[in-house]
Image (cartoon, helix red, strand yellow):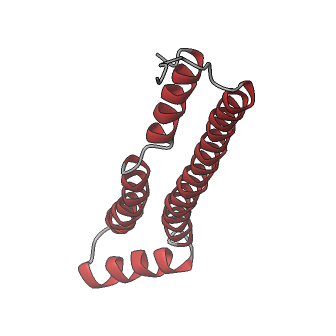
Amino acid sequence: MATDTYAPPDESSVTSLVSGIVNDAQTLMQQQLALFREEIREDLRKTKEAVTAIAAGVAVAGLALGPLVFMLVALLHELALWSWWASAATVGVVFAIIGGALIAVGVQRFRSFNPLPDQSVEALKENLQWIKNPK
């Protein structure tokens, strides 16, 4: 005659199960932190590209204030028979527009991405919440 008796689980198997869950949780946290670091690196790369574009725009606009600007003012004064101030104003406006467009490209690149790694932060919060309350 067979008896149906309940045998409680072996303590070592429960311990190993809990240990496995803890190890899995630690591995998950390490992976999420690695993802978080990688997203930060990617955002820093994008930031560097945007700053480079802005710096290039500022450099071009700054260089435009040199001898070429004076030469263009003099050329416009001679060819169009405009006064010096009208020639200088025309050349200055043209270079200001070009420099402003380059700066706008850099600013637009900044706005094209979010510098905070939203997905990783949200997943990290969810996992921390689950570890606190595994219900």
Q: Position of residue 123 (x, y in %)?
A: 48, 35
Q: Position of residue 68 (x, y in %)?
A: 49, 80
User: From this viewpoint, which residue is outermost toward the left?
Assistant: 80
Q: Position of residue 120 (x, y in %)?
A: 50, 40
Who's the residue at 36% across and 69% down the image?
Answer: 91
Residue 109 falls left or right of residue 65: left
**Residue 10 versus residue 120 in the image, above or below:** above
Residue closer to the observer: 54 or 66: 54
Residue 9 position by quadrant: top right
Residue closer to the observer: 78 or 111: 111
Q: Position of residue 124 (x, y in %)?
A: 54, 33
Who's the residue at 27% across and 77% down the image?
Answer: 81
Counting every numbered tag in the picture gives: 0
**Residue 35 versus residue 78 in the image, above or below:** above
Residue 3 falls left or right of residue 12: left
Who's the residue at 69% across and 39% down the image?
Answer: 23
Residue closer to the observer: 26 or 16: 16
Residue closer to the observer: 83 or 118: 118
User: From this viewpoint, which residue is outermost toward the front?
Assistant: 1
Residue 16 falls left or right of residue 66: right
Who's the residue at 33% across and 66% down the image?
Answer: 94
